[in-house]
Amino acid sequence: MLQPNSSLDALLERLSPEPHLRGKEFEHAAKWFLETDPAYASELREVWLWDDWPGRWGQDIGIDLVAETQEGKLWAIQVKCYDPESTVPKSEIDSFLAASSRPEFSHRLLISTGQITKNSESNLKDSDKSTAFLLYQGLTESPVDWLAYLYGSRPA
């Protein structure tokens, strides 16, 4: 087994090998990240898992997290936990695009440990809302120690 290059790699090694569980576990870690990373923690007032968001209208069909900014604007967030060398299927990004097109969301954020295709990136950038990408490289460059998530250093 290779030595992890970052605390994110070390966290990913500890997540479930079963894809659905791994994805759910990483959604929780991504929520923690947004609440902990200095850049996001100062911008966001609240971050919810989809199932906990008071405004949810049904099952998760592409939105994994919802965040509220200090100004009260809502972000739709999709979280993908893929091998950093893998590409997230376009169909999964398309479902996020459709689900997040509702008027209550002013911004989209895609958090992914995997890569996205140029087509998917264009579809998101050319959509009706501003979209940000937080991919593997950006996640590893954060000052956050991802292992702190596992060891209980979590915001209240």
Image (cartoon, helix red, strand yellow):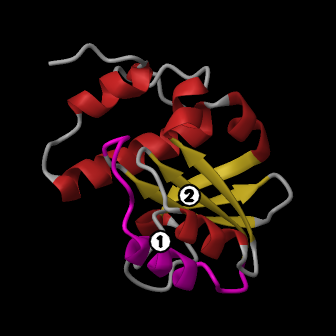
Indicate the quadrant containing the N terminus: top left, top right, bottom left or bottom right.
top left
Residue 110, numbered label: 2
> Looking at the picture, which amino acid does disc 1 mark?
Ile
Mark yes or no: residue 40 visible. yes
In space, the residues marked 2 and 1 are separated at their CA atoms by: 9 Å
Indicate the quadrant containing the C terminus: top left, top right, bottom left or bottom right.
top right
102 relative to 29 in the view: left or right: right
Say which of 55 and 115 sits in front: 115
148 relative to 140 in the view: left or right: left
Residue highlighted by disc 1? 93
Residue at coordinates 70% horizontally, 40% vertically from top-left? 40
Residue at coordinates 24% horizontally, 29% vertically from top-left? 13
Q: Position of residue 71 (x, y in %)?
A: 86, 58
**Disc 2 on helix, strand or loop?**
strand
Q: Position of residue 57 (x, y in %)?
A: 49, 85
Q: Position of residue 90 (x, y in %)?
A: 43, 72
